[in-house]
Image (cartoon, rainbow, N blue to C red):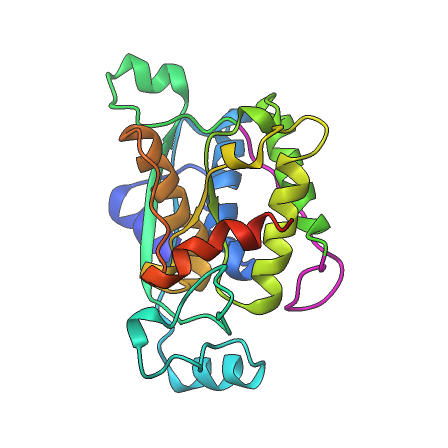
């Protein structure tokens, strides 16, 4: 319905496509839109994600699955702490993020202000558990390797990773393992200190279906402004980040 209303308001008659893939919805929306353009189905696509989920049922469900942060209720601003050793769950957030994707020559012809180029897209499924990732992060590695293959670049050419890390014990550990496996592998970097990773959920919370879209915006702005997004953690947590990401 959301996509339909936007299309009717602005007269968009290209592919009208809604993704429903839980917390990867925003990222898949942008990736799928890029493929519509690559396949010649459209010259321009509007893609992103939105989430309005602050509701008792939301808290009941995620609370039942023990996914929510409860250890820092006395300090709400520091409750969501991705990669921190004291993390114990995520904080639900609301919001939206939308990007305009355009075929390169089409954008140049109209003099568009191009902020970034989407070079590659990859996706995968763990085939493991309904909510928990594989502990070794192998499912996430598949998605990242497919994106790099699609972009024709090597892991060592990656300058910055905006992590999906939500602040859950199992999720952050698996993602850290995935990043380590990818970036320190055969085609990766030799020095782990050259890998730049940050998570922005510490500032925003976990926006569920909109998370991937807003993380894409952070990554685009990092390119456009030539600066990395800082880690959004409580001050005492910053020194622990690299130790957890790259143990040993």
- Quadrant of the image for the N terminus? bottom left
The secondary structure that dominates the magenta segment is loop
The picture places residue 117, in percent across and down from the top left corner, at 41, 25
The picture places residue 245, in percent across and down from the top left corner, at 56, 50
Q: Residue at x 40, y 62 (%)?
A: 207
Viewer-nearest residue: 95 or 132: 132
Q: Residue at x 53, y 40 (%)?
A: 32
Residue 161 visible, this angle: yes
Q: Is residue 6 above or below residue 14?
A: below
Taking the image as shown, residue 233 lies to the left or right of residue 89, namely left
Q: Residue at x 35, y 38 (%)?
A: 228
The picture places residue 23, in percent across and down from the top left corner, at 51, 60
Q: Is residue 107 above or below residue 15?
A: above
All told, the count of numbered labels is: 0
Q: Residue at x 41, y 61 (%)?
A: 237
The picture places residue 9, in percent across and down from the top left corner, at 25, 49
Residue 18 visible, this angle: no
The quarter holding residue 155 reads: top right
**Residue stretch in magenta:** 120-135
Extreme residue in the right direction: 127
Inspect the magenta stretch and tell me whether residue 191 lies in it. no
Inspect the magenta stretch and tell me whether residue 124 lies in it. yes
Taking the image as shown, residue 116 lies to the left or right of residue 131, namely left
Taking the image as shown, residue 142 lies to the left or right of residue 237, namely right
Taking the image as shown, residue 13 lies to the left or right of residue 39, namely left
Viewer-nearest residue: 122 or 171: 171
Viewer-nearest residue: 30 or 138: 138
């Amino acid at each position: 319905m959301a996509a339909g209303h936007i299309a009717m308001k602005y007269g968009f008659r290209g592919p009208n496509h809604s993704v429903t893939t839980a917390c990867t919805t925003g990222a898949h929306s942008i990736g799928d839109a890029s493929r519509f353009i690559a396949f010649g189905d459209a010259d321009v696509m509007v893609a992103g994600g939105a989430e309005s989920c602050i509701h008792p049922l939301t808290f009941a469900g995620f609370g039942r699955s023990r996914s929510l942060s409860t250890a820092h209720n006395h300090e709400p601003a520091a409750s969501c702490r991705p990669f921190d050793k004291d993390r114990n769950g995520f904080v639900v957030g609301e919001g939206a993020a939308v990007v305009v994707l355009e075929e390169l020559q089409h954008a140049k012809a109209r003099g568009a202000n191009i902020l970034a180029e989407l070079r590659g897209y990859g996706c995968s499924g763990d085939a493991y558990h309904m909510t928990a990732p594989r502990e070794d992060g192998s499912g996430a590695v598949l998605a990242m390797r497919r994106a790099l293959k699609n972009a024709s670049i090597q892991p060592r050419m990656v300058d910055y990773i905006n992590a999906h890390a939500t602040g859950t014990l199992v999720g952050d550990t698996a993602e850290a393992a995935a990043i380590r496996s990818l970036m320190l592998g055969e085609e990766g970097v030799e020095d782990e200190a050259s890998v730049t990773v940050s998570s922005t959920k510490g500032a925003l919370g976990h926006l569920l279906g909109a998370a991937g879209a807003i993380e894409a915006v952070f990554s685009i702005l990092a390119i456009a402004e030539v600066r990395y997004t800082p880690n959004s953690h409580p001050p005492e947590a910053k020194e622990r980040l690299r130790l957890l990401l790259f143990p040993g």
